[in-house]
Image (spheres, helix red, strand yellow):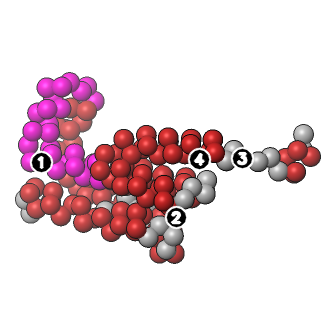
Amino acid sequence: MNFETIFSLSSLLVMPFWLLLIFLPRWRVTERLVAGPWLAVPAALLYAVLVLPRFGEVFTAVSNPTLAGITTLLASPAGATVAWVHFLAFDLFVARWVYLDGRSRKISSWFISPTLFMVLMLGPVGFLLYLVVRTAVAYQSPPTVSADAISGL
């Protein structure tokens, strides 16, 4: 299989999970899939399969990164595919955290789903957006102190 094909098909490993997270966040199947840590494993395994045969080249580039070295690494179909699969795996991992953290804080899916879309499209920007949403929601409804917490003082 060539890198063009791997690159084109790699998104299929994660897209079903993204669709569930964004469009069916309260469905029991979504909740069950996201509850475990295995969501990003298919993409992570593909990454390992792609990077291990090139371990020396990749490790050399990332252990002492220079702009020229990273440019050289990414300037090939193999390097671009490895980087793309890296994005897919880690963006989905971040999305899982956003989803679970949002649920634990009882943040509405109306806020979480667009934020997850931004994580999908622009990873770190979506993560920052979630932190803004999370802060705004906490500011709007600060946590209440329970009677049990007060009596324990």
Q: Which mark is residue 35?
A: 2
Q: Which mark is residue 52?
A: none
Sequence-wise, the earlier of marks 2 and 4 is 2
Q: Which residue is mark 4?
A: 137
Q: CA distance from mark 3 to mark 4?
A: 10 Å
Evaluate whether residue 153 shows in this view. Answer: yes
Say which of marks 2 and 1 sits in front.
2
Relative side of 60 to 33, left or right? left
Instruction: Name the one closer to the observer, 81 or 130.
Output: 130
Say which of marks 3 and 4 sits in front.
4
Specify start and end residues of the magenta stretch as a single range.
Answer: 63-88
Where residue 139 appears, as percent x and y from the top left, is 63, 41
Q: Residue at x 87, y 51 (%)?
A: 148
Type of amino acid at the residue the image marks with label 3 = Pro
Evaluate whether residue 93 shows in this view. Answer: no
Q: Residue furthest bottom?
A: 28
Type of amino acid at the residue the image marks with label 2 = Ala
Q: Which residue is mark 1?
A: 78
Q: Which residue is mark 3?
A: 143
Q: CA distance from mark 3 to mark 2?
A: 24 Å
